[in-house]
Amino acid sequence: MIRIVLEIIIPLLLPLFLYLLWMWVLRHRAGARGDEAPGIDSTGLFWSLVTGIALVVAGLIWLALSRGYDPDAGTYQPPRYENGKIIPPGFSKQPVPENPE
């Protein structure tokens, strides 16, 4: 769940939050000066959501390209229970069998 929050929800909502915070600051300043407060328009909301979607897409592409294991890491060994101990998952250094052709 925390992965979904960090990789999708925060990048999607961060520009929207920053836009609304900026509008709140502008309205607060205008109220203090006695000027007419600016309104929140749909254009700003639209572009903040478009920016959020672009951040999510860029983040997912970056994560896809930067994570993973070396193809020559060996054979994956899942976690197992041996002699009363849990052996964590990992890669064995045994060579992968070749396909005879």
Image (cartoon, helix red, strand yellow):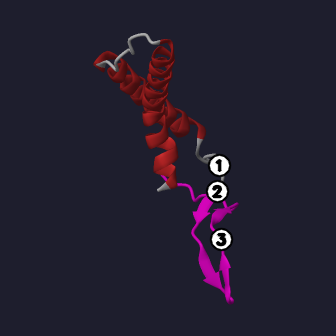
Q: Residue 6 bears which disc, if any? A: none
Nearer to us of marks 3 and 1 is: 3
Cα distance between the residues tagged 3 and 1: 20 Å
x and y, in percent, of residue 80 in the image: 60, 78
Element carrying mark 2: loop
Foreground residue, 32 or 85? 32
**Residue holding disc 1:** 72
Foreground residue, 20 or 27? 27
Foreground residue, 14 or 34? 34
The reply to whether the C-beta atoms of the residues labelled 2 and 1 are less than 8 Å apart is yes
Element carrying mark 3: loop
Q: Residue 96 appears in which quarter of the rendering?
A: bottom right
**Residue holding disc 2:** 74
Q: Is residue 9 above or below residue 73?
A: above
Q: Is residue 30 above or below residue 88?
A: above
Q: Looking at the picture, which amino acid does disc 2 mark?
A: Gly
| Magenta residues (range) | 74-101
Q: Residue 19 appears in which quarter of the rendering?
A: top left
Cα distance between the residues tagged 3 and 2: 15 Å
In the image, what residue occupies the spot 46% across and 14% down?
A: 30
Q: Is residue 76 above or below residue 86?
A: above
Q: Based on the picture, tell me whether residue 83 belongs to the magenta stretch.
A: yes
Nearer to us of marks 3 and 2 is: 3
In the image, what residue occupies the spot 31% across and 16% down?
A: 43
**Residue holding disc 3:** 88
x and y, in percent, of residue 70 in the image: 64, 46
Give the mark, 3 or 2, whose residue is nearer the N terminus. Answer: 2
